[in-house]
Image (cartoon, grey):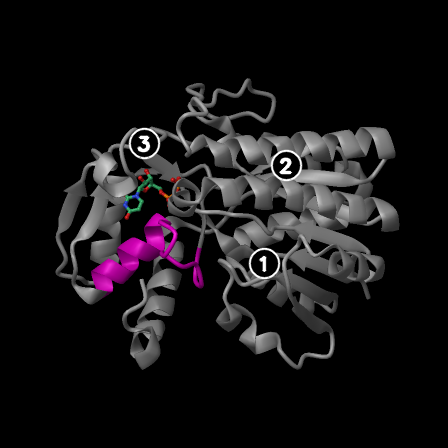
Protein backbone atom coordinates (compact mmCIF):
# COMPACT_ATOMS: atom_id res chain seq x y z
CA UNK A 1 0.00 0.00 0.00
CA UNK A 2 1.33 3.41 -0.96
CA UNK A 3 0.66 6.70 0.77
CA UNK A 4 -0.16 9.47 -1.70
CA UNK A 5 -0.33 13.10 -0.63
CA UNK A 6 -2.52 15.23 -2.89
CA UNK A 7 -2.28 18.98 -2.43
CA UNK A 8 -5.52 20.55 -3.64
CA UNK A 9 -7.15 17.16 -3.14
CA UNK A 10 -10.62 18.65 -2.56
CA UNK A 11 -10.50 20.29 -5.97
CA UNK A 12 -12.00 18.98 -9.14
CA UNK A 13 -9.15 16.80 -10.47
CA UNK A 14 -7.86 16.02 -6.96
CA UNK A 15 -11.12 14.54 -5.72
CA UNK A 16 -11.51 12.31 -8.78
CA UNK A 17 -7.92 11.16 -8.33
CA UNK A 18 -8.55 10.48 -4.63
CA UNK A 19 -11.54 8.28 -5.43
CA UNK A 20 -9.61 6.18 -7.95
CA UNK A 21 -6.58 5.78 -5.66
CA UNK A 22 -8.77 4.67 -2.74
CA UNK A 23 -10.62 2.22 -5.00
CA UNK A 24 -7.38 0.60 -6.05
CA UNK A 25 -6.11 0.24 -2.48
CA UNK A 26 -3.76 3.17 -1.96
CA UNK A 27 -3.87 5.45 1.08
CA UNK A 28 -4.56 9.13 0.40
CA UNK A 29 -3.98 12.22 2.47
CA UNK A 30 -5.13 15.54 1.09
CA UNK A 31 -4.11 19.06 1.96
CA UNK A 32 -6.60 21.71 0.90
CA UNK A 33 -7.65 25.12 2.20
CA UNK A 34 -10.99 24.89 0.36
CA UNK A 35 -10.31 28.18 -1.42
CA UNK A 36 -11.50 26.75 -4.72
CA UNK A 37 -11.85 23.11 -3.59
CA UNK A 38 -15.15 22.02 -2.05
CA UNK A 39 -15.96 19.88 0.93
CA UNK A 40 -18.76 18.19 -0.99
CA UNK A 41 -16.11 16.80 -3.39
CA UNK A 42 -14.58 14.73 -0.58
CA UNK A 43 -17.67 14.06 1.55
CA UNK A 44 -17.81 10.46 0.35
CA UNK A 45 -14.30 9.70 1.68
CA UNK A 46 -14.60 11.15 5.18
CA UNK A 47 -14.36 8.21 7.58
CA UNK A 48 -12.59 5.96 5.06
CA UNK A 49 -9.76 4.17 6.90
CA UNK A 50 -7.19 4.97 4.19
CA UNK A 51 -8.18 8.64 3.81
CA UNK A 52 -7.23 11.73 5.76
CA UNK A 53 -7.95 15.40 5.18
CA UNK A 54 -5.83 18.30 6.43
CA UNK A 55 -7.80 21.52 6.10
CA UNK A 56 -4.93 23.92 5.68
CA UNK A 57 -2.92 26.07 3.32
CA UNK A 58 0.07 24.57 1.47
CA UNK A 59 2.03 27.48 2.83
CA UNK A 60 1.70 26.04 6.34
CA UNK A 61 5.16 24.48 6.40
CA UNK A 62 4.68 22.40 9.55
CA UNK A 63 1.62 20.63 8.23
CA UNK A 64 3.17 20.16 4.83
CA UNK A 65 6.30 18.68 6.41
CA UNK A 66 4.31 16.20 8.51
CA UNK A 67 2.25 15.03 5.54
CA UNK A 68 5.27 14.77 3.24
CA UNK A 69 7.16 12.75 5.87
CA UNK A 70 4.44 10.08 5.65
CA UNK A 71 4.08 10.08 1.85
CA UNK A 72 5.71 8.00 -0.89
CA UNK A 73 4.23 10.13 -3.67
CA UNK A 74 3.14 13.78 -3.76
CA UNK A 75 0.72 14.99 -6.43
CA UNK A 76 0.86 18.77 -6.28
CA UNK A 77 -2.40 20.14 -7.65
CA UNK A 78 -3.02 23.03 -5.25
CA UNK A 79 -3.00 26.25 -7.23
CA UNK A 80 -4.98 29.33 -8.06
CA UNK A 81 -6.90 28.24 -11.17
CA UNK A 82 -9.57 29.53 -13.50
CA UNK A 83 -9.20 32.54 -15.74
CA UNK A 84 -11.71 34.68 -13.85
CA UNK A 85 -10.05 34.11 -10.50
CA UNK A 86 -6.62 34.81 -11.92
CA UNK A 87 -7.74 38.07 -13.53
CA UNK A 88 -9.52 39.15 -10.34
CA UNK A 89 -6.75 38.23 -7.89
CA UNK A 90 -3.36 38.19 -9.64
CA UNK A 91 -1.21 38.78 -6.52
CA UNK A 92 -2.76 35.83 -4.74
CA UNK A 93 -2.33 33.70 -7.87
CA UNK A 94 1.39 34.35 -8.10
CA UNK A 95 2.00 33.82 -4.40
CA UNK A 96 -0.01 30.62 -4.14
CA UNK A 97 1.48 29.12 -7.26
CA UNK A 98 5.12 30.06 -6.87
CA UNK A 99 5.58 29.94 -3.10
CA UNK A 100 3.33 26.89 -2.78
CA UNK A 101 5.31 24.88 -5.32
CA UNK A 102 8.61 25.96 -3.78
CA UNK A 103 7.51 24.67 -0.37
CA UNK A 104 6.13 21.41 -1.79
CA UNK A 105 9.37 20.71 -3.66
CA UNK A 106 11.43 21.44 -0.55
CA UNK A 107 9.32 19.04 1.52
CA UNK A 108 9.53 16.42 -1.25
CA UNK A 109 13.32 16.76 -1.24
CA UNK A 110 13.54 16.20 2.51
CA UNK A 111 11.67 12.89 2.29
CA UNK A 112 12.64 11.86 -1.27
CA UNK A 113 9.03 11.67 -2.44
CA UNK A 114 8.16 10.82 -6.02
CA UNK A 115 6.50 14.09 -7.09
CA UNK A 116 4.10 15.27 -9.79
CA UNK A 117 3.65 18.97 -10.39
CA UNK A 118 0.53 20.18 -12.18
CA UNK A 119 1.08 22.75 -14.88
CA UNK A 120 -1.20 24.03 -17.57
CA UNK A 121 -1.69 24.50 -21.31
CA UNK A 122 -1.79 28.22 -20.51
CA UNK A 123 2.02 28.18 -20.65
CA UNK A 124 1.78 27.86 -24.46
CA UNK A 125 0.22 31.32 -24.37
CA UNK A 126 -0.28 32.77 -27.82
CA UNK A 127 1.57 29.97 -29.58
CA UNK A 128 0.28 29.48 -33.12
CA UNK A 129 1.97 26.26 -34.16
CA UNK A 130 -0.75 23.64 -33.64
CA UNK A 131 -0.57 21.12 -32.02
CA UNK A 132 1.44 22.32 -29.01
CA UNK A 133 4.59 20.31 -28.41
CA UNK A 134 6.34 20.15 -25.04
CA UNK A 135 9.53 21.49 -26.65
CA UNK A 136 7.88 24.47 -28.38
CA UNK A 137 8.99 28.02 -27.68
CA UNK A 138 6.51 29.76 -25.42
CA UNK A 139 4.93 33.11 -26.23
CA UNK A 140 3.26 34.95 -23.37
CA UNK A 141 1.58 38.33 -23.42
CA UNK A 142 2.88 41.40 -21.56
CA UNK A 143 3.04 41.60 -17.78
CA UNK A 144 0.66 44.59 -17.91
CA UNK A 145 -2.12 42.07 -18.59
CA UNK A 146 -2.99 40.08 -15.47
CA UNK A 147 -4.13 37.04 -17.42
CA UNK A 148 -0.54 36.09 -18.13
CA UNK A 149 0.43 35.88 -14.47
CA UNK A 150 -1.10 32.41 -14.32
CA UNK A 151 1.03 31.09 -17.19
CA UNK A 152 4.15 32.87 -15.91
CA UNK A 153 3.72 31.54 -12.36
CA UNK A 154 3.17 28.00 -13.62
CA UNK A 155 6.17 28.29 -15.88
CA UNK A 156 8.29 29.27 -12.93
CA UNK A 157 6.93 26.18 -11.13
CA UNK A 158 8.10 24.08 -14.07
CA UNK A 159 11.60 25.61 -14.02
CA UNK A 160 11.81 25.05 -10.28
CA UNK A 161 10.66 21.44 -10.56
CA UNK A 162 13.16 20.66 -13.34
CA UNK A 163 15.97 22.40 -11.44
CA UNK A 164 15.14 20.31 -8.37
CA UNK A 165 15.28 17.20 -10.51
CA UNK A 166 18.66 18.13 -11.96
CA UNK A 167 20.35 19.54 -8.88
CA UNK A 168 18.92 17.27 -6.20
CA UNK A 169 17.85 14.24 -8.24
CA UNK A 170 14.31 14.48 -6.95
CA UNK A 171 12.11 12.29 -9.20
CA UNK A 172 9.64 14.91 -10.33
CA UNK A 173 7.38 14.98 -13.38
CA UNK A 174 5.40 17.90 -14.79
CA UNK A 175 1.99 17.52 -16.38
CA UNK A 176 0.51 20.26 -18.54
CA UNK A 177 -3.25 19.80 -18.25
CA UNK A 178 -5.41 20.92 -21.20
CA UNK A 179 -9.06 21.87 -20.45
CA UNK A 180 -9.98 19.06 -18.08
CA UNK A 181 -13.73 18.76 -17.55
CA UNK A 182 -16.31 16.44 -16.05
CA UNK A 183 -18.75 16.01 -13.17
CA UNK A 184 -17.92 18.03 -10.07
CA UNK A 185 -16.25 20.98 -11.78
CA UNK A 186 -17.63 24.32 -10.71
CA UNK A 187 -18.46 27.08 -13.18
CA UNK A 188 -17.82 29.69 -10.52
CA UNK A 189 -14.32 30.51 -11.80
CA UNK A 190 -15.27 30.74 -15.46
CA UNK A 191 -14.92 27.18 -16.75
CA UNK A 192 -17.05 26.96 -19.82
CA UNK A 193 -18.68 23.51 -19.73
CA UNK A 194 -20.19 23.62 -16.22
CA UNK A 195 -21.35 27.15 -16.96
CA UNK A 196 -23.02 26.25 -20.24
CA UNK A 197 -24.64 23.16 -18.73
CA UNK A 198 -25.95 25.12 -15.73
CA UNK A 199 -27.31 27.84 -18.01
CA UNK A 200 -28.95 25.27 -20.33
CA UNK A 201 -30.61 23.44 -17.42
CA UNK A 202 -31.94 26.67 -15.94
CA UNK A 203 -33.24 27.77 -19.36
CA UNK A 204 -30.95 30.83 -19.40
CA UNK A 205 -29.02 32.00 -22.48
CA UNK A 206 -25.59 30.40 -22.94
CA UNK A 207 -22.95 33.12 -22.65
CA UNK A 208 -20.50 32.72 -25.55
CA UNK A 209 -17.56 35.10 -25.19
CA UNK A 210 -16.12 36.84 -28.24
CA UNK A 211 -16.97 35.42 -31.66
CA UNK A 212 -17.30 31.87 -30.38
CA UNK A 213 -14.92 30.79 -33.15
CA UNK A 214 -12.17 30.09 -30.62
CA UNK A 215 -11.72 26.38 -30.03
CA UNK A 216 -10.59 24.00 -27.32
CA UNK A 217 -10.07 20.25 -26.79
CA UNK A 218 -11.94 19.01 -23.72
CA UNK A 219 -10.60 16.02 -21.80
CA UNK A 220 -12.77 13.92 -19.49
CA UNK A 221 -11.40 14.00 -15.96
CA UNK A 222 -11.54 10.18 -15.84
CA UNK A 223 -9.02 10.13 -18.72
CA UNK A 224 -6.91 12.74 -16.94
CA UNK A 225 -6.85 10.62 -13.77
CA UNK A 226 -5.68 7.62 -15.81
CA UNK A 227 -2.79 9.71 -17.14
CA UNK A 228 -1.76 10.73 -13.62
CA UNK A 229 -1.89 7.11 -12.42
CA UNK A 230 0.13 5.90 -15.40
CA UNK A 231 2.81 8.45 -14.59
CA UNK A 232 2.86 7.63 -10.87
CA UNK A 233 3.18 3.93 -11.74
CA UNK A 234 5.86 4.50 -14.38
CA UNK A 235 7.94 5.87 -11.54
CA UNK A 236 11.44 7.00 -12.39
CA UNK A 237 11.27 6.60 -16.17
CA UNK A 238 9.16 9.76 -16.38
CA UNK A 239 11.23 11.78 -13.90
CA UNK A 240 12.54 15.09 -15.16
CA UNK A 241 10.00 15.14 -18.01
CA UNK A 242 7.09 17.38 -19.04
CA UNK A 243 3.97 15.80 -20.55
CA UNK A 244 0.93 17.30 -22.24
CA UNK A 245 -2.25 15.63 -20.99
CA UNK A 246 -5.38 16.36 -22.98
CA UNK A 247 -7.76 15.36 -25.70
CA UNK A 248 -7.03 16.16 -29.35
CA UNK A 249 -10.70 16.51 -30.41
CA UNK A 250 -11.12 20.17 -31.17
CA UNK A 251 -14.44 22.03 -31.02
CA UNK A 252 -15.36 25.71 -31.34
CA UNK A 253 -17.14 27.35 -28.41
CA UNK A 254 -20.12 28.06 -30.71
CA UNK A 255 -20.40 24.37 -31.58
CA UNK A 256 -19.96 23.47 -27.92
CA UNK A 257 -22.86 25.74 -26.92
CA UNK A 258 -25.02 24.12 -29.59
CA UNK A 259 -24.05 20.62 -28.42
CA UNK A 260 -24.87 21.46 -24.78
CA UNK A 261 -28.32 22.77 -25.78
CA UNK A 262 -29.04 19.66 -27.84
CA UNK A 263 -27.86 17.07 -25.37
CA UNK A 264 -29.70 18.67 -22.46
CA UNK A 265 -32.93 19.17 -24.47
CA UNK A 266 -32.83 22.81 -23.47
CA UNK A 267 -34.83 25.69 -24.92
CA UNK A 268 -31.97 28.11 -24.16
CA UNK A 269 -30.60 30.49 -26.76
CA UNK A 270 -27.03 31.67 -27.28
CA UNK A 271 -25.97 35.14 -26.19
CA UNK A 272 -22.67 36.65 -27.40
CA UNK A 273 -20.76 38.71 -24.86
CA UNK A 274 -17.72 40.80 -25.83
CA UNK A 275 -14.52 39.79 -24.04
CA UNK A 276 -14.12 43.16 -22.35
CA UNK A 277 -17.53 42.74 -20.74
CA UNK A 278 -16.74 39.20 -19.63
CA UNK A 279 -13.20 39.67 -18.33
CA UNK A 280 -12.56 43.43 -18.30
CA UNK A 281 -10.66 45.57 -20.80
CA UNK A 282 -7.61 44.25 -22.65
CA UNK A 283 -8.33 40.56 -22.17
CA UNK A 284 -6.59 38.25 -24.64
CA UNK A 285 -8.05 34.84 -25.38
CA UNK A 286 -6.38 31.96 -27.21
CA UNK A 287 -7.88 31.13 -30.58
CA UNK A 288 -6.91 27.47 -30.61
CA UNK A 289 -5.39 25.11 -28.08
CA UNK A 290 -4.59 21.55 -29.15
CA UNK A 291 -2.03 19.32 -27.44
CA UNK A 292 0.41 16.99 -29.10
CA UNK A 293 0.21 13.84 -27.00
CA UNK A 294 2.82 11.63 -28.69
CA UNK A 295 5.20 12.00 -25.77
CA UNK A 296 2.92 10.62 -23.07
CA UNK A 297 1.59 7.95 -25.43
CA UNK A 298 5.17 6.83 -26.11
CA UNK A 299 6.13 6.88 -22.41
CA UNK A 300 3.16 5.17 -20.76
CA UNK A 301 0.71 4.30 -23.59
CA UNK A 302 -1.91 6.87 -22.51
CA UNK A 303 -4.40 8.64 -24.75
CA UNK A 304 -7.75 10.25 -23.95
CA UNK A 305 -10.57 7.85 -24.89
CA UNK A 306 -13.81 9.48 -23.79
CA UNK A 307 -15.81 11.51 -26.33
CA UNK A 308 -17.28 14.99 -25.92
CA UNK A 309 -20.74 13.39 -25.88
CA UNK A 310 -19.75 11.27 -22.87
CA UNK A 311 -18.35 14.35 -21.16
CA UNK A 312 -21.50 16.37 -21.74
CA UNK A 313 -23.81 13.54 -20.65
CA UNK A 314 -21.82 13.05 -17.42
CA UNK A 315 -21.80 16.78 -16.62
CA UNK A 316 -25.50 17.20 -17.48
CA UNK A 317 -26.39 14.23 -15.29
CA UNK A 318 -24.33 15.59 -12.39
CA UNK A 319 -25.72 19.13 -12.69
CA UNK A 320 -29.32 17.87 -12.92
CA UNK A 321 -28.88 16.00 -9.62
CA UNK A 322 -27.22 19.05 -8.09
CA UNK A 323 -30.02 21.39 -9.15
CA UNK A 324 -32.54 19.12 -7.47
CA UNK A 325 -30.82 19.78 -4.14
CA UNK A 326 -32.48 22.96 -2.81
CA UNK A 327 -29.37 24.53 -1.30
CA UNK A 328 -27.52 24.38 -4.66
CA UNK A 329 -30.18 25.95 -6.83
CA UNK A 330 -28.63 29.39 -6.92
CA UNK A 331 -25.02 28.27 -7.31
CA UNK A 332 -23.46 28.60 -10.74
N1 LIG B 1 -16.08 30.90 -22.41
C1 LIG B 1 -17.31 31.33 -22.92
N2 LIG B 1 -18.35 31.52 -22.04
C2 LIG B 1 -18.25 31.28 -20.68
C3 LIG B 1 -17.00 30.85 -20.18
C4 LIG B 1 -15.94 30.67 -21.07
O1 LIG B 1 -17.46 31.53 -24.13
O2 LIG B 1 -19.23 31.49 -19.97
C5 LIG B 1 -14.97 30.67 -23.36
C6 LIG B 1 -13.65 31.30 -22.95
O3 LIG B 1 -13.58 32.65 -23.37
C7 LIG B 1 -12.66 30.40 -23.68
C8 LIG B 1 -13.34 29.04 -23.68
O4 LIG B 1 -14.72 29.28 -23.41
O5 LIG B 1 -12.48 30.82 -25.02
C9 LIG B 1 -12.80 28.09 -22.60
O6 LIG B 1 -12.84 28.76 -21.35
P1 LIG B 1 -12.44 28.09 -19.97
O7 LIG B 1 -12.44 29.18 -18.95
O8 LIG B 1 -13.28 26.89 -19.74
O9 LIG B 1 -10.96 27.56 -20.20
P2 LIG B 1 -9.66 28.26 -20.84
O10 LIG B 1 -9.46 27.52 -22.12
O11 LIG B 1 -9.92 29.71 -21.05
O12 LIG B 1 -8.61 27.98 -19.83
Specify the quadrant that holds the C terminus. bottom left
Residue at (83% x, 62% y) in the render: 70
**Residue at the extreme front of the image, as rendered:** 91
Q: Nearer the viewer, residue 256 or 81?
A: 81
Question: On the image, which quarter does residue 284 sit in?
Answer: top left
Q: Verify whether residue 101 appears in magenta.
A: no
Q: CA distance from mark 1 to mark 2?
A: 20 Å
Instruction: Indicate which disc, 1 or 2, sits on the residue closer to the N terminus.
Output: 1
> Looking at the rendering, which quadrant does residue 268 occupy?
bottom left
- SS class of the residue under badge 3? loop
Q: Name the residue: 15% across, 48% down.
A: 270
Between the C-alphas of marks 3 and 1, the distance is 29 Å
Task: Please tell me which residue lies in front, 191 or 296.
Answer: 191
Residue that carries the numbered disc 1 in the rendered image: 14
Please name the residue shown 41% across and 34% down the image. Answer: 147
Q: Is residue 293 visible?
A: no
- Looking at the rendered image, the quarter that the N terminus falls into is bottom right
Q: Please tell me how many numbered marks the rendered image carries.
A: 3
Where 305 falls versus 183 (above or below)?
Answer: above
Contact, CB < 8 Å: mark 3 with mark 2?
Answer: no
Magenta-colored span: 182-201
Residue 89 in picture, x, y percent from top left: 44, 45
Q: Nearer the viewer, mark 3 or mark 2?
A: 3
The residue that mark 2 highlights is 296
Label 1 CA crowd tier, 10 Å (few <14, some 14–19, many 20+): many
Name the front one of labels 3 and 1.
3
Question: Which numbered disc covers residue 283?
Answer: 3
User: How far across and down, in percent of the image, does residue 201 sit?
Assistant: 23, 65
Q: Looking at the image, in which quadrant does ligand 1 appear?
A: top left
* Horizontal relation, residue 64 to residue 250: left or right: right
Amino acid sequence: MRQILITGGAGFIGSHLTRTLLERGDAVSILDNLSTGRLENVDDFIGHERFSFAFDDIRNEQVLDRLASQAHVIVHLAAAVGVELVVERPAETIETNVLGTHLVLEAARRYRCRTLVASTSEVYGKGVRIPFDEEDDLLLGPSSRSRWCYAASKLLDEFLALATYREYELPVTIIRFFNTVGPGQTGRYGMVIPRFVGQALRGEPLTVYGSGMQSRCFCHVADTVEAVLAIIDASDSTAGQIYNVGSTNEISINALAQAVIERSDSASTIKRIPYNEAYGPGFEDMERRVPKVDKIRGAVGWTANRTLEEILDDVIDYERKRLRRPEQRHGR
